[in-house]
Amino acid sequence: MLRRLAFLFSLALAVPASAQPAKPPADLVAPGKLTYGTAATFAPFEYQENGQYVGFDIEFGAAIAKAMGLAPAMLDMDFNGLIPALQGKRVDLINSAMYINPARARQVDFIPYMRIGNEIIVRKGNPLHIAARSDLCGHRVAVTLGAIEETYARAVAADCAKAGKPALVILSLPTAQDSALAVRQGRADAEFDSTPGAVMLTTNFPDAFEIAGAPFETHTLIGIAVRKDDPAMKEAIEAAVHAVVANGTYAALMAKYHLPAAGSLF
Amino acid sequence: MGFVSPGLILHYVLSRAFFTGALMTLLISVVALALGMVVGLAVALAQKLPGLRLAAIFYLWLFRGTPVMFQLIFVFSVLPAFGLVLSGFTCAVLALGLNEGAYMAEIMRSGLEAVGRGPVLAARALGMRENQVLRHVVLPQALRIVVPPIGNQFIGMLKLSALVSVIAVPELLLIAERTASATFRYLEALAAAGIYYLGLTTLFMLVQAVIEWRLGRRRRPAGGRRAAWPALTQLLLRATADAGRTR
């Protein structure tokens, strides 16, 4: 309590002095810090390079925190654990390129910031001649546990069952890298990944992977997630996102990480 | 977080997905433990043989000295680089079984070493061959000693098998996590998995109790279940008397 009072006091001093456009809400996990949860296994949005956390979301999160007059604090965890961590107040928000779908939107509130599609990734040469999701019946697809790709895979499995085709085997792995490895090693026949992630993977490992068929679910939005009972945080993040868009950082980051400008929501 | 729904927990417990997940957990545990016991006995016996002693110690050093999770991921992700792509289930059983073997070897060794020189010499004096001594004299006594620690390992293995969820083997924990991440009913899905784990460990404890009772009964000269309590007191008295005599 005392700490919170002290924090509020320091806030009262800090905010007018720096005149930030987005006032941070009072009830933060760590005073003076914007603590966000991320699963840093989803290039090019959040991943590690030479021991450093990099990616669009990492820099976007830092810019948002700066606009709020806070220091960014990242908590790297399994994707599957992000929503429980937010609901359990371990983090202030989720900044992990999370796809917005109705099931998640019932649990958390989203501030959308980009539109991205998905791809089917297969081994180089596409030995099974996969051209669409329906070709995957009877084969194995690797997805990240709890990620949107797992939901898509479940939908494909249901379609295979409905059509009386052989069953789709879903391999739920902890990270997108595990899924890529599973495809490379022949444990899985395909992997679902976001379009930017697939482009990056096939660019980095052109001899191992290729994209099969056309992108699917191309109109999915990704967003920053906040708790449902926290409208102050949502307003603050929305204001900060607009500030980051207005000062050109958003567009510059999209260019830096080779994200298609058509995905911009601003 | 919403309300706790006991009905949903029950629904998960009775669902086919959770039931097959629990079967998978049981299957991995039993097969890995069986492999561990075979490997453990072999390593324990190898430690007695001069030619194999170093190899046995190397095995213990390697498998007790690294985390099981490390061994699991090694078998799953590194062996394919050497052209050996095993299924998730095989990787799970192999890693857990080989790890278990190292611990089991020490349990087996303690059982074998607990059998005194006296009975062995007596058996030899009766003209028994070495394998007969092992079969009729050493193993029956050693078995009685190793049952409680093996029961311990079995229950430990059941819980250790949850690690296998990271290599996409659809055992109980992965089923619970998948269900929870699709419905966001974490409490209910994990509670259902917890009920299965507790049910399975309870079952194992009962099996262990039955095995111990049957092994113990053979030792007692007379009396069935009715005589169990007097027999137990007798056993305790004899044990204390023996202890007094040897020390």
Image (spheres, coloured by chain):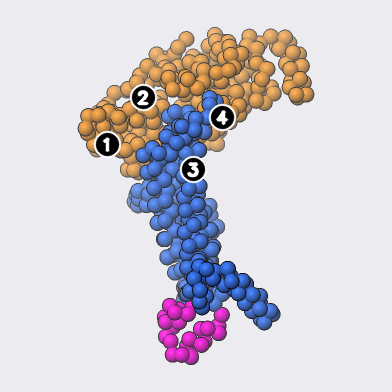
Give the numbered dot on residue A205. Answer: none
Camera-near label (4 vs 3) is 3
Residue type, mark 1 in image: Ala
Q: Which residue corresponds to mark 1?
A: A167
Q: What is the letter of the orange chain? A: A
Spatial CA span between label 2 and label 4: 26 Å
Name above or below for residue A24 compared with residue A126: above
| Chain letter of the residue beneath label 4 in the structure image | A
Q: Main secondary structure of the magenta part?
A: helix
Q: Residue B118 lies in magenta, yes or no?
A: yes
Q: Read off the magenta span.
A: B116-138
Question: Is disc 4 on the same chain as disc 2?
Answer: yes
Please report the residue visible at 59 percent of the width from the left and 17 percent of the height from the top: A230
The image position of residue A118, as x and y in percent, is: 36, 24
Reply above or below: A166 against B117: above
| Closer-to-camera residue (B95/A127) | B95
Q: Which mark is residue A85?
A: 4
State yes or no: discs 1 and 2 in contact (Cβ < 8 Å). no
Residue B242 is situated, as x and y percent measured from the top left of the image, at 64, 79
Residue type beneath disc 4: Ala
> In the image shown, does B133 or B85 lie closer to the viewer?
B133
Q: Which mark is residue A118?
A: 2
Nearer the observer, B236 or A156: B236
Q: Secondary structure at mark 3?
A: helix
Q: Residues within 10 Å of mark 1 (few under 14, many from 20)?
A: some
Could you tell me how many numbered marks the image carries? 4
Label 2: chain letter: A
Q: Amino acid at mark 2?
A: Asn
User: Which residue bears the numbered disc 3?
Assistant: B195
Q: Residue flagged by tag 3: what amino acid is it?
A: Ile
Find the distance from the CA under tag 4 to the CA under tag 1.
34 Å
